[in-house]
Image: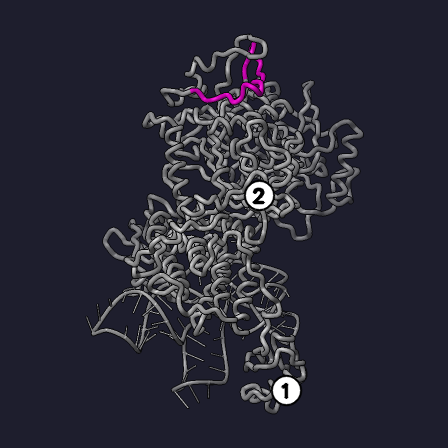
Amino acid sequence: MTTADPAYRGCRLSRDDMAGYPFKEIEAKWQRYWEENRTFRTPDDIDTSKPKYYVLDMFPYPSGEGLHVGHPEGYTASDIVARYKRMRGYNVLHPIGWDAFGLPAEQYAVRTGTHPKITTERNVARFRTQLKSLGFSYDWEREVNTTDPRYYRWTQWIFKLLFERGLAYQEELPVWWCPELGTTLANEEVIDGKSEVGGFPCVRRPLRQWVLKITAYADALLEGLDDLDWPESTKEMQRNWIGRSEGAEIEFDIEGHAEKLRVFTTRPDTLFGATYMVLAPEHGLVDQLTSPERKAEVDAYRDQAARKSELERAELQKEKTGVFVGAYAINPANGKRIPIYIADYVLASYGTGAIMAVPAQDERDYDFAIAHGLPIVRTVEPPEGFEGGAYTGDGRIINSGFLDGLTVAEAKAKMIEWLEAEGKGRRKVNYKLRDWLFSRQRYWGEPFPILFVDGEPKTVPDDHLPVTLPDLEEFKPSGTPEGPLATARDWIETVDPETGKPARRETNTMPQWAGSCWYYLRYIDPQNDERLVDPEKERYWMPVDLYVGGSEHAVLHLLYARFWHKVLYDAGVVSTPEPFKKLVHQGMILGELEYTTYVRDDGAFVSAASVDGGRDTATGRPVTPKRIAEAEVEKQGDRFVLRADPKIVVDARAHKMSKSRGNVVNPDEIVAKHGADAFRLYEMFMGPLEQVKPWSTTGVEGTHRFLDRVWRLLVDERGSLSSKVAREEPTRDQLRVLHRTIAKVTEDIEALRMNTAIAALMELTNAMYKWDRVPHEAAEKLALLLSPFAPHISEELWSLLGHAESLAYAPWPEADPALLKSDTLEIPVQVNGKMRGRINVPADADQDTVIAIAREDDNVKRHLEGQNVRRAIYVPGRILNFVVGG
RNA sequence: GCCGGGAUGGCGGAACUGGUAGACGCGCCGGACUCAAAAUCCGGUGGGGUAAAACCCGUGUCGGUUCGACUCCGACUCCCGGCACCA
């Protein structure tokens, strides 16, 4: 680092803001210093003998709204760790970039005609300014942007790799088609039959699509989870999403037909109890199996099922509908004829799209059997007194021939053995995970590096990458399943560079997930035009040591990224099987706590306890919610009531921030009013990082006040170092407080407990206010400890304390264990587990001494008076408990 | 319905392996400074009780283990997040 330019040091700190320290000048000054001195630049040629730490933030989508207060929460936590690790001597990689492809920019383009590139540039510029204003220690020279052709060239390169490895294929698939958006959507972008963006109705229709074979990695993705330091809930969500289940595939003969019916079951042990079969309405054999006299009914049912939205199918689940197709299958275990039905409670997309129904051991089958008068044969003996219909627990096998008397687990194994010996079935593992629909009919996404030559797809040669997006005049979705790119004739019609034959380009583009699947690799080597990432650099920096981002990405982004990473690992491009070693989700920040009353149409207040569905339950008349001030309510028992009329219960809760509710907090305003340091500090002080927590305006004022106190402790009215700061040795007591704080802050940062680390710094400051003079050393340590949290003020204090260089690489203070202990201890004394007094004892006092001192305490003495002390339990240094009585 | 997380003062939260419940901050109350206000500084602040103490109650509910439980065990209530006919 270069010596601070006198221009910075001489920066006049204006005194017009009498209310507090001059944070505006300080923050602007240090942001400029860091930028001009490239303080947080992580060089390409690095001393690799030093340990590394890769701290990654989930990069933002640069929306037109700008940053919201949720972004800086995770970003501040990771920045604290990055700054801390630098001071501990690590090489730190702490980058940021832009996930800038996506629907909003395209929709904006449709509305206004503004090219998404323009919108994106504008939004990125705004985000960049906002992030810089918060003092994050990113290496800005490593910024990546998924919409930059130099970046998406490598996204395309990875797609080629997937294609060449047989992991990308085309298929006619029923996909969600949204007429309003004029595009298809992935399953996860459709909620209850409506588009996630916009809430427009969607229908399913078949379309030629690119699909990635993520199912080939299902087991690897499942097993890889075990060793990851990730939130258990997220790992569990991924496990459920993959949905591995073990069982058997069984073949049923069909009476009078050559075809066999294959089903998947996790309960092969119950085969003897299979009394009918069900096909999904979409199943391929339905037409063949339907008898002429049943055809009308079956067709009607299928039509009806096809028209039902997912929502309706889900909501009508109480009633199990279905129709008999007029054919029978033969149960391979007992040779019995069992009827075949179609019913929409069987999903076409899972397993084989057909099931064997065992009503005695499956609730859904039981409901259906009852509704359609089908036989129910128990094959597992329920426990005595069992009242329900289907029994799904363990027990002894009955009515099952050669399985009788076994447990469920034993019978499963034996049945599979039998099926395999008889050639009627086999062991089988099934997954809920489906292959990943990877194409979108949009403009603002990565083009596929694919040419169709003679109707066959082939990849574009590497030296012709990237395939760049053509500039369009018109961004409207064509309204047909062909995307907007279909209108770019000159772009589509091209020549295969390898054969010279005419070729057509793929007009689909990749989904937004593509760019975010591998961006963490590009940060390592962002300018490399020869390779995706230099292998040597990759080996040094990977894996990501800490990844911070929202839990809304718990499944999709994090699963897709792991999938790509594993493919790259198998291809030898990366050196680790998993990309993200430790993962943390920041909790959502809600709006300020609100008190809400309900006002009836006649103007009367209605108690929140008797409001349901927007109506007063007593009179049935409509009510409107009305927000009221905190001063108007008081707590009574476990609820809040109106102060003026305690019969009226008031709702007290914090809501998600939303424009419609008008409770959105704008970070720019907070920074302008209280400064970036106070803002960062407050975001961390609110509570545990992972927890959902409500915003509080007075809370920010509190952290601002704390920084004012720190400033006034060390700086006088003229902006110079206070005369209280003295070149003198700290006393033993001062050292103890100081070193306890060092130990606490260090442990807390390591464990990401930023809230308690800040509390410790506040305690230290409170203690220092009681000192007559502040030893220089103590002031320095305070500045260093505070610097990861509130870097600007800390740098300014550090500089006032006589340092010419930034503290960004100053060694982190070490706690001396010898200084943590005090000479005397305060020991709480209990009698029969109840607190009766406190005594002061020498730190090295033995049990007998402690007991003797305790017996002298007046209050303890009174409780021991005339009592028989049966035991005295002394936990050294912690507590003493007398057990008395008969 | 299933899976995961949670419930502690007026509010956000703290209490690490069972050992002083309520750190720290907000809010509120009182005092100092000021003509006054703001800002700042000092003190108080779970509920009851007392002149002050003592003492009693208190970590969603009920029960258990223990010298001792916010913490461990069992049952339950409510809240938040996710999945949801996955055979």
The quadrant of the picture occupied by the C terminus of chain A is bottom right
Frontmost residue, A869 versus A665: A665
Residue under the point 59% across and 77% down:
A823
Residue A235, by quadrant, is top right
Q: Position of residue A812 (x, y in %)?
A: 55, 57
Q: Secondary structure at mark 2?
A: helix
Magenta stretch: residue A721 in it?
no
Q: Is residue A787 visible?
A: yes
Q: Residues within 10 Å of mark 1 (few under 14, many from 20)?
A: few
Q: Secondary structure at mark 1?
A: helix
Q: Position of residue A155 (x, y in %)?
A: 54, 28
Q: Are marks 2 and 1 on the same chain?
A: yes
Disc 1 chain ID: A
Frontmost residue, A273 versus A630: A630
Residue A852, label in figure = 1
- The region drawn magenta spans A451-470
Q: Are marks 2 and 1 in contact (CB under 8 Å)?
A: no
Disc 2 chain ID: A
Residue A498, by quadrant, is top right
Q: Tell me the residue that label 2 is attached to.
A: A237
Residue A299 located left or right of residue A33: right
